[in-house]
Image: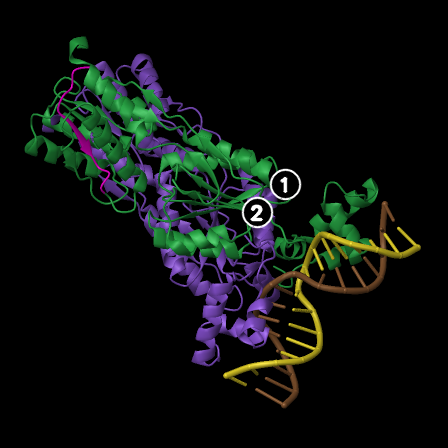
Chain colours: A green, B purple, C yellow, D brown
Amino acid sequence: MTQRTVTMKDVARAAGVSVMTVSRAFKADSSVSAAKRAQILKLAEDLGYVMDSTAANLRSQRSDFVAVTIPSLNNANFADTVSAMSEVLEKSGMQILLGYTNYDIQQEERLVAQFLQRKPAAIVVTGGLHTDRTRKLLANAGIPVVQTWDLPADPIGHVVGFSNALSMEPLVAHLHTTGRQRIAFIGGDATGDTRGAERRKGFIQSMTARGLDANRLIPGGQVPISMKEGAAAMATLLSDLPDTDAVICVSDLSAFGALSECARRGIAVPDDIAIAGFGAYEIAGVAHPTITTINPHPRRIGSRTAELLLMTLGKKAIVDTMRFEITPDFVLGGSTASRDDI
Amino acid sequence: MTQRTVTMKDVARAAGVSVMTVSRAFKADSSVSAAKRAQILKLAEDLGYVMDSTAANLRSQRSDFVAVTIPSLNNANFADTVSAMSEVLEKSGMQILLGYTNYDIQQEERLVAQFLQRKPAAIVVTGGLHTDRTRKLLANAGIPVVQTWDLPADPIGHVVGFSNALSMEPLVAHLHTTGRQRIAFIGGDATGDTRGAERRKGFIQSMTARGLDANRLIPGGQVPISMKEGAAAMATLLSDLPDTDAVICVSDLSAFGALSECARRGIAVPDDIAIAGFGAYEIAGVAHPTITTINPHPRRIGSRTAELLLMTLGKKAIVDTMRFEITPDFVLGGSTASRDDI
DNA sequence: TTGAAAGCGCTAACAC
DNA sequence: GTGTTAGCGCTTTCAA
């Protein structure tokens, strides 16, 4: 419980060397004799020395961490993206500074401003919609910027994402070709969830392109639309538009809520109504029946982002921006089996 | 895209004042004239100035962030704890530096070491089991330490948690008094998940105290035991010990997996077998039937921790350690309804 | 209310 | 291989 913190100077004095030698002993690639290094590291450990990376970063004018903002901590898909990113980055000795925006671009602005004060090596944000000030801060930060989980029309820097709108097409195609005609959409109306809104927009486009009625839109409520809200929306759908024969939900969580509401009411899925989701969350593969969904490959988004950063950070200047497009995959579940198959 | 970063000096020159005045203008409580402050802040914004908190922290020898480690990002309960903590802390202008250990105390050691290099104002860890070096690092850090989600016998600093072992008692009591005799336990065997292990231990104690057989223990597999593993464990249970009439799962996620396995096999819950979980995850309230569970109040753990820190950080020295015990609540669901009720 | 000087702990740059 | 000097951008301290 010593109160004065042990500094490099203390270690240097104890080892009878200069602080510079101690500094070098802590860097792998330097030119300290092996014996001296071992002695210094041992001594440092005994003294309880902890390097002050605040000072190191200030002096060297660089840091070994990447700032990342996600909409919500409590979302397995974003968590997977961050985990995968982290696994790649930590191999190069980099860390992630994680923050969440609560699906609020004002909150994002505050977070980005705070993060930039810490001088990260790069910054990764989720989505392509930001406040003007956030855009300005990011553009002027002088570090690599990556926007993920989206394909912004007017990107700030690098992009690793997919089209949320186009991701709905395989679902609509599948439902239509398996004989569904009156297809509804749950969610995508929540303020802040731009990706959900994009998916609803894509649903409308795909329906309209097929000459199907795209007006069966059920609001999902507060962002992030959860299981309970999915169940409530399903209840609304069943009472307002009882002839609906299929429903696409903005995520698997709401789809599971919808599914459980059907179970509760004794409505057969997929016989009476087909249900599809988005995200390929674990529950889609475990629910009974399993839920047809779209896998946007969250881990791939994370690892591609990390690889991109490792490439870029080697360079002295930000030469040009890159754009990685991820292709979401259709995942067939029991919840949309065609009636003929039953 | 200017490459040289704008510093306080640049702002000072532009405003025709000293850097000290600029510095003061950025602190709320200082003594700069209102007009000058407004002018300086405006100028700073125009120049794209971003304060370097690396330098500020180094000079002032303090920081405005709290380091937090959790076992996994992908866990709604830990996410809730962090969210609640964050909401309280940000009112005092503090931020959270979040890292996850992947349920591995070696990984935790690395993370704690890295976090301490950044000189956080305090550090919060999940659980009470750490490597010797982690304990030493935490004890010597000279900052408040909080262990959460557990009640360690030999705490390092403050504690905000509950007894995972004792949390099983209400479940066993409930199942026993509603006529269940042959009760199994799924999970709690995964290396790294000490809280799961504690719950299994508590299950055995509660069963033994009632003179019930506590040997129906089904391994859940890799940590964190998920829905799929819960389903697989249920399959094992049903084939190995078919006369089992109730099962407690280490978490609601595995409980839901178990429930869905029963649905798949046409086994009636709770008629043929009762299922209970732990954690009061959203799915427990949405599944059909709803799942009986224990609510450990993850948000309360987070907000209590944050309040404790705000109290402590005001003081100059760490005076004495505090211990907040959270009381988990029993939540009755349909998955354990007594047979007479059916 | 404002400014000048000093220095937080470390590393870049250069010397030997 | 090792040491010396200077200084990263800010805030503490003291003076005016």
Marks 1 and 2, Cα distance to the nearest angstrom?
12 Å
Q: Is residue A184 magenta?
A: yes
Question: Is residue B73 positioned above or below B336 on the image?
Answer: below
Magenta stretch: give its range. Answer: A178-189
What secondary structure is the stretch in magenta mostly built from?
loop
**What kind of residue is marked 1?**
Lys
Mark sitting earlier along the chain (1/2): 2
Q: Nearer the viewer, residue A219 or B17?
A: B17
Q: Does the stretch in magenta take in A95? A: no
Could you tell me residue A172's position as x and y percent? 23, 23
Indicate whether B329 appears above or below B247.
below
Which percent across, then down, holds residue B150? 42, 45
x, y (%) of residue B33? 46, 81
Dot label at residue B145: none
Asked where in the image residue A70 lies, by quadrant, the reply is top left
Q: Residues within 10 Å of mark 1 (few under 14, many from 20)?
A: few
Kindly identify which residue carries mark 2. Answer: A121
Query: What amino acid does circle 2 point to?
Result: Ala
Q: Is residue A31 left or right of residue A298?
A: right
Q: Which residue is mark 1?
A: A315
Neighbours of disc 2 within 10 Å: few (<14), some (14-19), many (20+): many
Q: Which tag is nearer the camera, tag 1 or tag 2?
A: 1
Q: Nearer the viewer, residue A25 or B5?
A: B5
Q: Nearer the viewer, residue A130 or B128?
A: A130
Q: Quadrant of residue C5?
A: bottom right
Chain under numbered label 1: A
